[in-house]
């Protein structure tokens, strides 16, 4: 906490720490996170902060006095988290040591993934970064040590989210990314047991109601997929190369891309070559041009 506050201060942010238990406890007199947020983050109806950085694992919404967030109707205004209407950045503490954290590809251990990523999604919290690793002191007792670079990222991210909240709706720009694995047209937006195109269709309509400028209109979720397929997707096996060039939203000369590649660090270059071959690669590269999907 001290390390995070120090980083925020260097970013020019006025930050305040709030310590609370999650649930109410009649024995100890603890009133829980729902009371604490209402007591300290609002004054005479005015919401004081512009962003919340949460270090607590699991879902805050299950401790709402009005009932767990996921049991409330979609249009319900009860519950302090919905009333505050603030971006909540969820940070993580991994149970790996710093050495393990930097050497592994997963970053978070299984418990950390469940408690700090999966459960907070019930609240609609924003995934941030791991900010601490689990170490042992000279007596063999565990403690959490800050990750300096990741704390910097969280601080900058919180500033951007705070600025975004104060930005006029008509000036906001939003990207919605569909899952597409394996990279075939029939798997665009695939999700087990979920109709993600329909969900995005309703999301787009809700964003438009909130004043977000969205130029494209769709009849339904299927129409979204049809319009995606009419352009250039990851599945290019059924299109003639010249047709791919015509449909691409932009074309990057290979020489220009190679210049960008040369500006990368040797480590990043090695990883790209290992995965994609020598720059500019062969995927969607036609007639010395890298084609942009969309």
Image (cartoon, rainbow, N blue to C red):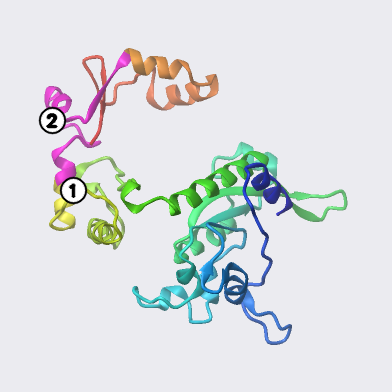
Does 266 lie within the magenta span?
no
Farthest residue to the bottom: give it. 26
Against 168, residue 98 (above or below) is: above
Query: Which residue is the site of mark 1?
Result: 216
Residue drawn at 60 percent across, 48 percent down: 130
Query: Which residue is the site of mark 2?
Result: 239
Q: Quadrant of the C terminus?
A: top left
Q: In this view, does 214 lie to the left or right of 13?
A: left
- For discs 2 and 1, the disc positioned in front in the rendered view: 1
Q: Which of marks 2 and 1 is nearer the N terminus?
A: 1
Q: In which quarter of the image is the N terminus?
A: bottom right
Q: Which mark is residue 205?
A: none
Residue drawn at 59 percent across, 40 percent down: 104
User: Closest to the observer: 201 or 244?
Assistant: 201
Quarter holding residue 255: top left
- Whole-angstrom CA distance, mark 2 to mark 1, is 25 Å
Does 233 lie within the magenta span?
yes
Q: In this view, does 186 lie to the left or right of 148?
A: left
Asked which secondary structure carries label 1, the reply is loop
Part of the protein shown in magenta: 227-254
Residue 283 appearing in the image: yes
Against 271, residue 254 (above or below) is: above
Residue drawn at 58 percent across, 54 percent down: 91
Residue 107 appearing in the image: no
Against 246, residue 232 (above or below) is: below
Asked which secondary structure carries label 2, the reply is loop
Q: How crowded is mark 1: few (under 14 residues within 10 Å), some or many (20 or more)?
A: few
Residue 90, image x, y percentages: 54, 56
Residue 42, image x, y percentages: 56, 70
Residue 256, image x, y percentages: 35, 15
Farthest residue to the right: give it. 139
């Amino acid at each position: 906490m001290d390390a995070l506050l120090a980083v925020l201060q260097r970013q020019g942010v006025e930050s305040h720490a709030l310590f609370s238990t999650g649930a109410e406890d009649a024995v100890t007199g603890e009133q829980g996170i729902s009371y604490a947020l209402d007591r300290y983050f609002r004054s005479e109806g005015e919401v004081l902060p512009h962003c919340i950085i949460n270090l607590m694992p699991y879902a805050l919404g299950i401790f709402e006095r009005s009932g767990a967030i996921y049991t409330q109707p979609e249009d319900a205004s009860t519950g302090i988290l919905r009333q505050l209407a603030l971006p909540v950045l969820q940070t993580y503490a991994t149970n790996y040591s710093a050495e393990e954290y930097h050497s592994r590809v997963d970053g978070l251990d299984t418990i950390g993934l469940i408690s700090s990523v999966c459960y907070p999604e019930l609240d609609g919290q924003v995934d941030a970064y791991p900010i601490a690793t689990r170490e042992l002191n000279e007596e063999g007792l565990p403690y959490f040590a800050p990750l300096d670079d990741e704390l910097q990222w969280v601080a900058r991210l919180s500033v951007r989210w705070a600025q975004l909240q104060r930005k006029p709706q008509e000036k906001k720009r939003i990207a919605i990314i569909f899952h597409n694995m394996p990279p075939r047209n029939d798997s665009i937006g695939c999700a087990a047991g979920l109709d993600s195109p329909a969900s995005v269709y309703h999301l787009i309509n809700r964003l438009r109601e909130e004043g977000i400028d969205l130029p494209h209109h769709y009849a339904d979720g299927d129409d979204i997929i049809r319009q995606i397929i009419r352009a250039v997707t990851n599945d290019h096996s059924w299109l003639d190369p010249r047709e791919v060039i015509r449909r691409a939203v932009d074309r990057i000369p290979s020489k220009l891309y190679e210049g960008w590649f040369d500006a990368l660090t040797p480590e990043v270059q090695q990883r790209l070559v290992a995965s994609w071959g020598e720059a500019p690669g062969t995927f969607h590269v036609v007639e010395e041009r890298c084609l942009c999907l969309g």
